[in-house]
Amino acid sequence: MTTSYETIKTRLDGTVLSATFSAPPMNLIGAEVVRDLVAMLEEVSHPAAPKVVIFDSADPDFFLPHVDMTKVPEYTAEAAKAGGPGDASLGMLFRKLSRLPAVTIAKLRGRARGAGSEFLLACDMRFASRENAVLGQPEVGIGAPPGAGAIQHLTRLMGRGRALEVVLTSSDFDADLAERYGWVNRAVPDAELDAFVAGVAARISGFPRDALIAAKAAINAVSLPSPAEVRADAALFQQLVRGEKVRQRTAELFAQGFQTRGATELDLGEALGRLKAAD
């Protein structure tokens, strides 16, 4: 596999594929990113696909900051192409990522919030730069619950109390705290991150493919949410994200520079805390 897409640049090294998000100005999850993910996941699903896929970002400040709030219908329509109109959600697209017959590793530098965090959670492993990684689930602060897997994955990984803390506070979390809570596998010093992830990928890629696929499938059977659970979360998000409270709160954020490379996006957790109190 050597295909590169409009927003994902790929490089194959033996049986390890590197896939780098590059969607200027800040890697928002919009129709183009989702379209490319749908195509890439289809290609990686084939029997001759790489054993390991490493996802990272060309932008040191933003991995996948969140969805483009101005393009919800557009990216949802693209997500539907992965599973049909009945599965028109990022949650079901990300579930397909979790079930790939390849090992997926996220190498996190920059901000991964909302659906960006949910993309990471759908990967098999997550390794984060200790100095330069930020995670968050800002949806409740905006006016809707997470809808693409965070509720299911975080509760399984962290337990009820910590998952509620992450989701209900809509705060930003640094890599050390994310590691302690189980959001990422490890926080690694930034200077060591590339070599560390490359070493993990090389080790795994040297093992028999059948054993990797069988072990992953068995763990998925224990840990992945069911399609019904993913669809229920997606339906609730899609219902509330179109509501008046979300419109008002995102309008306030846009007035402060939301979805641009400025202080609001760099410190979105703090910005959410300054919004007008809601009922």
Image (spheres, rainbow, N blue to C red):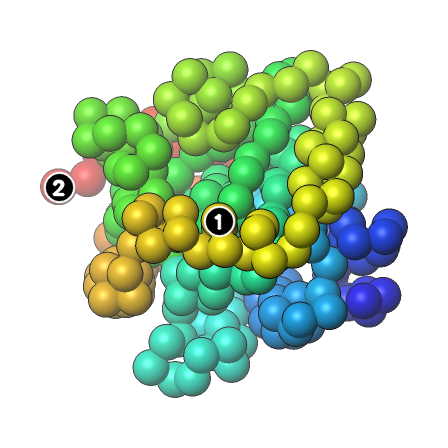
Disc 1 to disc 2, how far (Cα)?
47 Å
Of 93 and 48, nearer the camera is 48
Secondary structure under badge 2?
A: loop
**Residue 17 location (% of width, % of height):** 77, 53
Q: Is residue 68 above or below residue 271?
A: below
- Along the line of sight, the residue nearer the viewer: 276 or 191: 191
Can residue 67 be seen from the camera position used here?
Answer: no
At x 63% / y 34%, what residue is drawn?
A: 108
Q: Is residue 12 left or right of residue 234?
A: right
Give coordinates of residue 15: x percent, y percent: 79, 53
Q: What residue did someone put label 1 on?
A: 215
| 46 versus 141 height, above or below | below
Q: Amino acid at mark 2?
A: Asp
Eyeballing the image, is 24 above or below 1? Answer: above
Residue 62 occupies which quadrant of the picture?
A: top right
Q: Is residue 236 above or below residue 224?
A: below
Q: Could you tell me which residue is drawn at 69 percent across and 33 percent down?
A: 200
Q: Please, which residue is most extreme toward the bottom here?
A: 85
Quarter that holds the N terminus = bottom right
Q: Amino acid at mark 1?
A: Ala
Q: Residues within 10 Å of mark 1 (few under 14, many from 20)?
A: few
Residue 199: mark in rendering: none
Lateral position of residue 225 relative to residue 172, left or right: left
Q: Quadrant of the C terminus?
A: top left
* Residue 259 in the image, given as x and y percentages of width and height: 57, 47
Q: Which residue is mark 2?
A: 279
* Nearest to the observer: residue 187 or residue 27: 187
